[in-house]
Amino acid sequence: MEKYRIAGGNRLHGEVEISGAKNAAVAIIPAALMVDGICRIENLPQISDTVTLLHILESLGAGVKMINPSTVEIDSRHATWKGADYDRMRKIRASYYLVGAMLSRFGVARTTMPGGCNFGVRPIDQHVKGMNALGATVDVTDYIDAKAIHGRLRGAEIYLDKVSVGATMNIILAATLAEGRTIIENAAREPHIVDLANFLNSMGADVRGAGTDTVKINGVDRLHGGTYAIIPDQIEAGTYMAATAACGGEVLITNVIPKHLDCISAKLREMGVTVEEYPESVLVRSSGRLRRANVKTLPYPGFPTDMQPQMGVALAVADGTSVITEGVWDNRYKYVNQLRKMGAQFQVDGRVAVVEGVERLHGATVEACDLRAGAALVIAGLCADGVTTVEDIEYIERGYQDLVGKLQALGADIRIVDEPEHSERLNANAG
């Protein structure tokens, strides 16, 4: 089993280029299923989630051609909803975006329930509410089966009971080829929602208001081919910012949209980190002890839940007592037990964690329990004394392109090692 082996204690110095946004890519790839022509997607992150989705599109009959590692051409003109690769669908959260895309394109859809990281229940009630309003029946078991009652979806006014990124994006997908106008109220506002809307509009859709709490979609008869570049990944950039803060050093983070990082930059400055903004980059400089801070995760433009574990590591080595309040997911503190193995002091009560900063963390063998928790454990290993082994790295590689290579270029002592499972080692020793 491949693992990360990290010798901690090195400060980070240099320059790192951010890849395309995972959370945008995993919706834009399903959206390509709706395009009546060839669409070229650039700045595609090279991560396991995007590879899985491209395989799923191929199983549906779409043509997929990699032009280079970050550019793909997708031809869905001969695609059909039958024959999907359900085993791959089960592995990723983004499988549910195929519901909106399939309904929009074919009038019928079948996907698995969302998989991916396990940090709380993934309710899809707002997705179902949206599809029902657009004129689809939805049956949820181990699969999600949906069908447009009239053969083609029809526009509707939809109020989301809870701000939901996934439901907002799924309804946009479904409404794009629907008959008439759809209005989504209380919509999520994240940058990757804007990116999905911009992708669809570049292919002939009419989506307005993305990035606000009211999104209006005027249905069109077809989408045409075109070329689109995915925005930089806000969370990948934030992860390198948090790593620099925790380890110390100076890192220039390029290919970013600084406005998307405002809440992260503001919190790091509060903790004593220097963050300088340039048109398409940020410079992060950290020296000395970090200061305590309180963090509450909220929908955009609030502090992102996907940055909570990484910031938790930085607070674990800061002076004083910090409080983290998780405002999005019920169970995003599974990583805390792993950090405790490294000497971190966390007390968790429901959605609130109290963090007592320690002088240093120490190396240990830890397990990544989800994507962002895994990234947090890597940061912990980088700033800890001694050697840390991070297991279950497949979670991390779902969302970070060349994490090891990029960190090595910054001076980190991290490498991938291939070791047998513990039980295999025992059997080998017994033999």
Image (cartoon, rainbow, N blue to C red):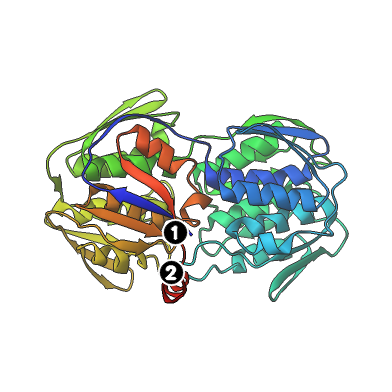
Q: Residue at x 51, y 58 (%)?
A: 163
Task: In this rendered view, identify the residue nearer to me: 175 or 106.
Answer: 106
Binning the other alpha carbons within 10 Å of mark 1 as few (below 14), some (14 to 19) or many (20 upward) gives: few
* Position in image of residue 289 (x %, y %): 12, 45
Residue of label 1: 419
* Front one among 407 and 217: 407
| Front-lying residue, 308 or 381 | 381
Nearest to viewer (mark 1 / mark 2): 2
Asked whether residue 211 is in view, the answer is no
Q: Residue at x 42, y 62 (%)?
A: 328
Q: Position of residue 218 (x, y in %)?
A: 73, 43
* Residue 425 image label: 2
Q: Position of residue 56 (x, y in %)?
A: 72, 53
Is 192 situated above or below 229?
below
Q: Residue at x 16, y 51 (%)?
A: 318
375 displayed left or right of 45: left
Query: For the residue marked with disc 2, what is the amino acid?
Result: Arg
- Disc 1, SS: loop
Please tell me whether residue 372 is drawn above or below residue 230 in the rendered image: below
Q: Please, what is the three-letter code of the amino acid marked with disc 1?
A: Glu
Residue 369 image position (x, y, % from top left): 43, 64
The vertical placement of 226 against 142, above or below, is: above
**Picture disc at residue 335:** none
